[in-house]
Amino acid sequence: MAVIIDHLKCNGCRDALESRCEEVCPGNLMIRNEEHKAVIRSMSDCWDCMACVKACPMQAIKTKLPYELAAFGAELKPKTTNKQIVWTLKYPDGREEVFTIPVESI
C-alpha cells in the first residue's frame, strides 16, 4: 500500500507543536516540510497501519491500495468521529462501498 498526502488539503495542523500524523505514527516517519506540510520520511519503512490516515483532521492523507487487494486505482479513506470510523472504499470505476465501525470510548 502507499500513503499519499494531498498538500493542497494539508494545513500541517496549523500552529500545533506536532501535527496529528506526527503524533500517531508508530514508526516516527511523519514530519512537516519547510512549507509546513506533512511528508513521510521513508515510504519503504511505512508499516501501512493507516494511523496517519485516520488521524488527519483535514482528510489530506489517503491510502492507495495495491492491485492485489483491489483494482488498480482503488482508494480506502476513513472519516473519524468520536463515535465511529466510516471507511469509504472507492473503486476505479467510481463505485463506492461504505463500512461503518463504532468506536468505543475509553
Image (cartoon, grey):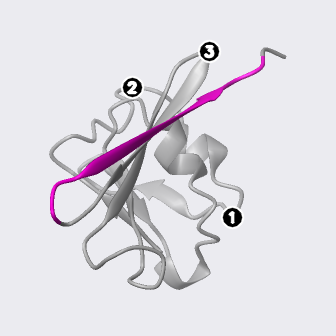
Q: Earlier in the sequence, mark 1 or mark 3?
A: 1
What span is in magenta?
A: 93-104
Q: Amino acid at mark 1?
A: Gly
Q: Nearer the viewer, residue 33 or 69?
A: 69
The image position of residue 34, as x and y in percent, is 28, 55
In this orientation, which residue lies closer to the viewer: 106 or 24? 106
Task: Write down the residue under mark 2.
Answer: 15
Task: Measuring from the top left, give residue 13's x and y in whole percent.
Answer: 39, 31
In space, the residues marked 1 and 2 are separated at their CA atoms by 23 Å
Q: Residues within 10 Å of mark 1 (few under 14, many from 20)?
A: few
Is 79 colored magenta in this rendering?
Answer: no
Would residue 15 appear left or right of 73 to someone viewing this image?
A: right
**Within 10 angstroms of label 2, few (less than 14), some, or many (20 or more) residues?**
few
Residue 91 is left or right of residue 39, and the answer is left
Of 15 and 54, the residue lying toward us: 54
| Camera-side mark, 1 or 2 | 1
Amino acid type for the residue under numbered disc 3: Lys
**Front: mark 2 or 3:** 3
Residue that appears at 47% across and 48% down: 53
Q: Of helix, strand and loop, which one carries label 1?
A: loop
The residue where tag 3 is placed is 83
Q: Earlier in the sequence, mark 2 or mark 3?
A: 2
User: Residue drawn at (28%, 35%), measured in percent from left and top?
Assistant: 11
Q: Amino acid at mark 2?
A: Asp
Vertical order, 25 against 46 (above or below): above
Sequence-wise, the earlier of marks 1 and 2 is: 2
Residue 44 screen position, x and y as percent:
53, 85
Could you tell me how many numbered marks the image carries?
3
Q: Which residue is mark 1?
A: 27
Query: Which type of secondary structure does the marked residue at label 2 adopt?
Result: loop
